[in-house]
Image (cartoon, rainbow, N blue to C red):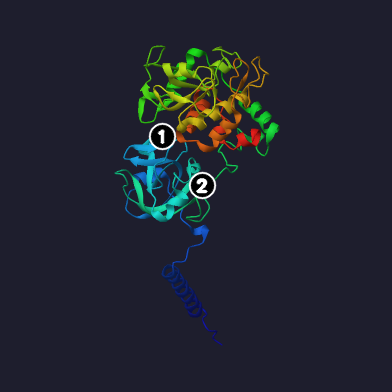
Amino acid sequence: MTRPNPLPSLLRGRRATTTWLALASALVVLLGLSAPASQAATPLTVAQAVAGQDGASHTVRGYVVGQPTATSTVVRSAFPSDYALAIADTASETGTTRMLYVQLPTALRSQWGLQSNPTLLGKQVDVTGTLAAYFSHPGMTGTTAVAAAGSGGGDTGGGTGGGTGTSPWDGTYYAPAIGKTGTALKASLHGIIDDQTKLTYDQVWDALKDTDQDPNNTNNVVEIYSGRSIAKSDNGGGVDQWNREHVWAKSHGDFGTATGPGTDVHHLRPEDVTVNSTRGNLDFDNGGGAVAQCSGCLVDGDSFAPRDAVKGDVARMIFYMAVRYEGDDGWANLEMNNSVGNGTAPYIGKLSVLLQWNAQDPVDAFEMRRNDRIHSTWQHNRNPFIDHPEWAAAIWG
């Protein structure tokens, strides 16, 4: 008896399966259904997007590093609008040629624009749109979606608020501190950051020429209070030159310029000689009269206030010093209080104002690059309040 050959039936079954799969795929396209997450395309890097301006729609992953306002200008504070983002492959990127300029349509501005959501700075996002020039610069136009990186959704809401935040250093450098708060967090951070390479006061000149380099002119540094860009070589003690400003005034604890707190570049910054003299050893507080050669700065008999764009920077440097120097290495125990006029005592104020400044002026790309350079090249320790600004409130709030 001859048995029937099963092969034609099997082939017919496979053809039927293939036909149904084709129909199902067509329905996905026609109905606009999304593919499973496991089948979603991997987002492009910013470098790939900059190099591949092909006029097609893509998703790109990068860190928000500022707002583009011109072909070679990206602002990192005092954002003028919610119209655009600049993203890069690293949160500390300052070179505009390595950034993608992302146009934000009206529907996305209130949730993803930096004027409305300044705490987005430094966050990683996925943006979807057409890779095409914006501001005559490699960019994305016709943006259809923005999402927190890896969230799988688009247009899901804007800034991250205070939050607890994350840092690439959480699993390594900050591992002993994660999950702690209050005095336990402060003690843990002190044990981490007091392991550092100490510089001489002469070495500080070279360090500042690197850490405070103007992102738009590599021959210059940016002065902390005035915001003026000045030639790196124009340093010294003469009028209109820049010198080394101790943000934690060196008389507050009487450490001078000796190796240690007096040479710690986490709080040493370039500043105009005259403005540095005006600040002197004053505590920090709101209010006062205008400061010559320092637009936006204020001063009175017992306090100084920097321009708005760096108030958070100042606060985070003070927080660092109060954690780094705890009186266990031959130097005074530096602490903050809610007073002004602290004189030569190892205190600086006002704590309540510094916490306010930390909240109102978020960490920007300049600060992040500076922290990275100090860690990688100079002192080999980090300012934890740049990586985790919310830790200030966790300790002193």
Q: Which residue is mark 2?
A: 159
Cα distance in 3D space between marks 2 and 1: 21 Å
Question: What residue do we see at 32% from left, 51% from top?
Answer: 54
| Quadrant the N terminus occupies | bottom right
**Foreground of the two, 317 or 265:** 317
**Foreground of the two, 321 or 88:** 321
Q: Residues within 10 Å of mark 1 (few under 14, many from 20)?
A: many
68 versus 352 height, above or below: below
**Foreground of the two, 111 or 16:** 111
246 versus 151 height, above or below: above
| Quadrant the C terminus occupies | top right
Q: Callout 2, which amino acid?
A: Gly
Taking the view exactly as shown, the residue that stands out farthest to the bottom is 1
In the rendered structure, which disc, 2 or 1, sits on the residue that comes first in sequence?
1
Labelled pair 2, 1 in contact (Cβ < 8 Å): no
x and y percentages locating residue 174 in the rendered image: 62, 34
x and y percentages locating residue 17 in the rendered image: 49, 74
Q: Which numbered disc covers residue 94?
A: 1
45 versus 389 height, above or below: below
Left or right of 344 on screen, residue 124: left
**Foreground of the two, 31 or 291:** 291
Identify the element where label 2 is drawn: loop
